[in-house]
Amino acid sequence: LAFVAIFGLLFMTLGSVGRATAVFLTLPLGLAGGIFTLALTGINFSVSAAVGLIVLAGVSVLNGLVVMTAIRERQEHGLPLVEAIREGMTEKMRAVIMTGFVPAIGFIPMAIATGTGAEVQKPLAVTVIGGLIAATILTLLVLPSIAKVVLGAIENRKRKRTENAPPAAPEPA
């Protein structure tokens, strides 16, 4: 239900199913990074780790939304898709890196804690750190490709429709 709500909000924000789909497809990347980090460190999945995955979902979608908004703005100004992706990624790369790595750095004390409550904090912190790093890197590397494939397919479909459309009938005088 939460993922349906996220997709609905993305659609309302971006105004296109294709753009919302491209951003939504970045969501599993962050979640996979968090789960992989848990497995790598040998920490069992817990409620704290699940909360970390929720955090990751939010940050992954935020990063994708920032990038896709920049791409959409460039397309609306008439840039071709590939140029819009390149310029949008170039402009928003610093914002995505800061949004991903700064919180990950902030969770390091929780991840290395050994005192009271560390057994609750550690799964959350490890999940968020690994997931944010993975989500950030994959957003920068994979989202442009996803956007090219999804938005390119939509452009091709629109182009074919206009080429195959019957000519307009002349209006009677």
Image (cartoon, rainbow, N blue to C red):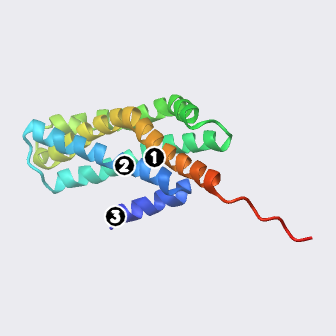
User: What percent of the width, then of the height, locates residue 127?
Assistant: 21, 43
Q: Is residue 114 visible?
A: no
Tell me which amino acid carries mark 1. Answer: Val
Left or right of 18 in this view: 158 = right
Disc 1 is placed on an element classified as helix
| Residue toward you, 4 or 156 | 156
Side of 32 where 8 appears, left or right:
right
Q: What is the secondary structure assignment of the residue under circle 3?
A: helix
Rendered-image quadrant of the C terminus? bottom right
x 34%, y 49%: residue? 27
Q: Amino acid at mark 3?
A: Ala
Q: Residues within 10 Å of mark 1 (few under 14, many from 20)?
A: some
Dot 1 corresponds to which residue?
150
Viewer-proximal residue, 142 or 156?
156
> How far, Cα to Cα, is label 2 from label 3?
15 Å
Q: Nearer the viewer, mark 1 or mark 2?
A: 1
Residue at the (42%, 36%) spot, across then down: 145
Q: Position of residue 15 (x, y in %)?
A: 56, 57
Dividing the picture into quadrants, the one containing residue 82 is top right
Of the residues shown, which amino acid type is indicated by label 2? Leu
Local SS, label 2:
loop
Marker disc for residue 25: 2
Sequence-wise, the earlier of marks 1 and 2 is 2
Between the residue at mark 1 and the residue at mark 3, the CA separation in whole angstroms equals: 23 Å
> Residue 20, percent across and down?
46, 53
Q: Which mark is residue 42?
A: none
Quarter containing the N terminus: bottom left
Mark 3 lies on residue: 2
Give yes or no for contact between labels 1 and 2 (Cβ–Cβ under 8 Å). yes
In percent of width and height, residue 40 lies at 11, 36
